[in-house]
Image (cartoon, grey):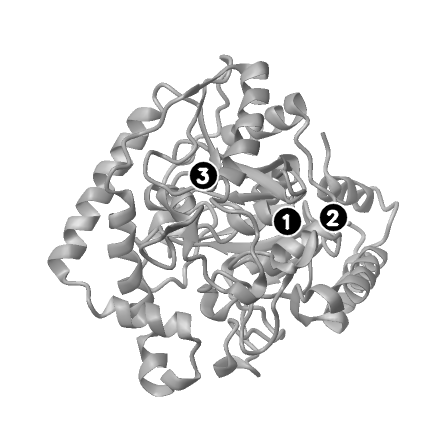
Amino acid sequence: MSGALRTLRDALARREISARAAVERSLAAIARRDPALCAFLTVAADSARAAADALDARPDLAGPLHGVPVAIKDLADTAGIRTTYGSTLYRDHVPNADDAVVARLKRAGAVIVGKTMTPEFGFGAVCVNDLAGPTRNPFDPALTSGGSSGGAAVAVATGMVPLAHGTDFGGSVRTPASFCGVAALRPTPGRLPNPGRALGWDMLSTAGFIAGGADDLALALEATAGPDPRDPLSTRDFPAEIPAHAPRVAWTEDFGVAAVAEAVRAPFRAAVAKIDAAFGARPAHPDCAMAIETFHTLRPPLIRQAYAGHYRTHGDALTRTVRWWIERGAETKAADWLAAEAERTALYRRFLAFFESWDALVAPAAAVLPWPNEAGDVVEIDGVALPTLIDYLAVTFVVSLVGCPVVVLPVGRSAGGLPVGIQLIGAPGKDAALLALAARIEEACGFRRIEPP
């Protein structure tokens, strides 16, 4: 079933609506909804109008996203548009060049209408920084939209844009999508290349997309994916074949290791029951016994490597969360790092073996429901204290460790009326097959974008 993105794209391709009209509609929605929600850090109205006018003057279509308004998370560089990375250190920073994914979106014909909110450098449970925020959940403005692509999720959920770019390290497109009732894609790392990444072989973080449904996510990926020799992960082969057999779907509530609130487990079970009725689904998952400890070891040094220079020169200007991560990164010994990488490799191979028998693994897209913005971090689940500030993300960061593609689908509401999503996880490189299965599940089970008030 066509979503808002594909419907708009088709209308633009037939010239039933001009690019300028599509952009004006998006800017009007931002002006109407954003003051109360703070999804955007920067709105690029003038450059968006100029780009739309240039597209309308063309006799041909620029590409598969011709004239589509798109929002970019403010962690990605945008030429001529302010890019702060959510930090006061970059309050007035205007890049000269586009991030690779932004350049591909533009080449496909997309129009950048603005930059969405993120916590500083993308690290934070609540989408807030010292420049703006918090980004408020459209279902209840007192609650968080999720970190760190909360602005992107809110922009799509409220119809400000049909497609938003995000990034995902431990769950940063998946958690906000679940909290805001929309769909998201964390692709296989390298599918959307990042030639500017300092550590070319690291795959914990990747760009992704937030949209209304699986069909729209597939369109966004088709328009932007492809190899770049400067990114060593992007040179891998990504088979596009879709299995002819009936889908083999497994499910897990927690991978055997993650803390997940009962308020999430109940609607998750209801969603699994629908999938089981449509296709069959059985409880199963790879052995993830050391996954949490492995992620705890690997993540802090990566953050320290990227931001230690800021800590030395402007430590007092950084948020508490960023300082905490950088300081933790100094504690990791090389032997511990190598042991964690070995465990990660073993986990990856267990996932590969698992997907020889299964086409997809279903899990909750977030371990908790949205909580009040003022509460900050999640320190306990169902009354049980969590060891660290990120353990509430274990249900998503387990998947980040092994580089599987993940589609988040909104599946319903909690007992209190808040959106709940699932992760549909596939074998590395099987993005196309996973998106096709996600579309089938949406249609068969009636899973749809959940409209906020």
Residue that appears at 54% across and 73% down: 129
User: Which one is in front in this view, the residue at disc 1 or the one at disc 3?
Assistant: 1
- Amino acid under disc 2: Pro
**Distance CA(mark 1)–CA(mark 2):** 8 Å
- Amino acid under disc 1: Cys
Q: Residue 451 in the image: state x and y as whole percent.
A: 74, 44
* SS assignment at label 2: loop
Is 170 situated above or below 364? below
Q: Looking at the rendering, in which quadrant would you find the N terminus?
A: top right
Q: Residue 153 in the image: state x and y as whole percent.
A: 62, 53
Residue located beneath label 1 in the image: 180
* SS assignment at label 1: helix
Relative placement, left or right, of 165 versus 122 is: right
The numbered mark, 1 or 2, whose residue comes first in the sequence reads 1
Residue that appears at 29% across and 47% down: 292
Q: Quadrant of residue 439?
A: top right
Q: Could you tell me if the residues under marks 1 and 2 are in contact, i.e. CB atoms within 8 Å?
A: yes
Check residue 75 in the rendering and tell me which mark sits there, or answer none: none
Q: Residue 69 in the image: state x and y as whole percent.
A: 72, 56
Residue located beneath label 2 in the image: 452
Q: Could you tell me if the residues under marks 1 and 3 are in contact, i.e. CB atoms within 8 Å?
A: no
Q: Residue 155 in the image: state x and y as whole percent.
A: 68, 56
